[in-house]
Amino acid sequence: QQQVKQSPQSLIVQKGGISIINCAYENTAFDYFPWYQQFPGKGPALLIAIRPDVSEKKEGRFTISFNKSAKQFSLHIMDSQPGDSATYFCAANTFSGSARQLTFGSGTQLTVLP
Amino acid sequence: KAGVTQTPRYLIKTRGQQVTLSCSPISGHRSVSWYQQTPGQGLQFLFEYFSETQRNKGNFPGRFSGRQFSNSRSEMNVSTLELGDSALYLCASSRGQGSGNTIYFGEGSWLTVV
């Protein structure tokens, strides 16, 4: 029930195209859904995040779409650039009592071709 | 503003030894959590500390332990190292524990067990 399932495992997109990464969850206690971007040799960096009471959030070229009833959320990268080539992780946060935990998806390796 | 700082960045240990990793959170951040990242298992939650108390622990053996000091700095220790402990260990900090508190990651400590 703690799992977050992420797809696809890898994604190749042409420059200027749209990259779409999907995540699904089961635990309705998740209350915060961040996306992280990780470059080789670096730690994950927060990209964008959303709460379950919001259906969409946009920041620049990055948009999260959230479907609470379907327990799914997705990251859309518009006008994808070669510099966006990285591994993307969705995550879901639980905060119960005084305990907090981020559960991560398995990651999507995005390659944007020039 | 300095980010999350982890030391050492790289280390090689022999099976059976122990290791201590250090984390300095972002100034003003009181919550520190640790994650293990491996190619096979992805990002897995180890534990979270807030106000010098362990608030949550992931599904790892007792060989993995940690602590947090009064200045919010944290250390994690792995005893009796096994080859499978080779991983990137990531420290993350946030101002508080609530779901609205963004979690920021450090660059990680690369541990190789030989």
Image: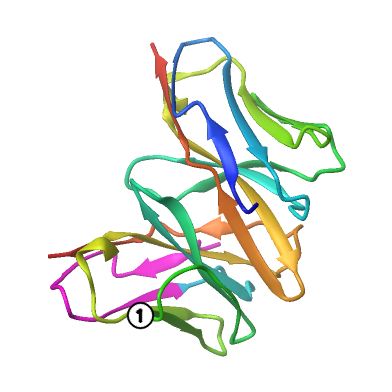
Task: Report the residue marked by disc 1.
Answer: B63
Q: Residues within 10 Å of mark 1 (few under 14, many from 20)?
A: few
When the figure is inspected, residue B83 is found, relative to residue A105, above or below; the finding is below
The residue range painted magenta reads B1-23
Which residue is found at the position 62% from the left and 63% from the top? A101
Give percent across and percent down for residue A15: 47, 11
Between B43 and B67, the one nearer to me in the picture: B43
When the figure is inspected, residue A91 is found, relative to residue B93, above or below; the finding is above
**Which amino acid, mark 1?**
Arg
Between A99 and B28, the one nearer to me in the picture: A99
Instruction: Decide if residue B63 is on the left or right side of residue A58.
Output: left
Which residue is found at the position 45% from the left and 29% from the top? A9
Instruction: Decide if residue A48 is on the left or right side of residue A83.
Output: right
Q: Where is the C terminus of chain A found, in terms of image quarters?
A: top left
Give percent across and percent down for residue B23: 43, 73
Which residue is found at the position 47% from the left and 74% from the top? B24
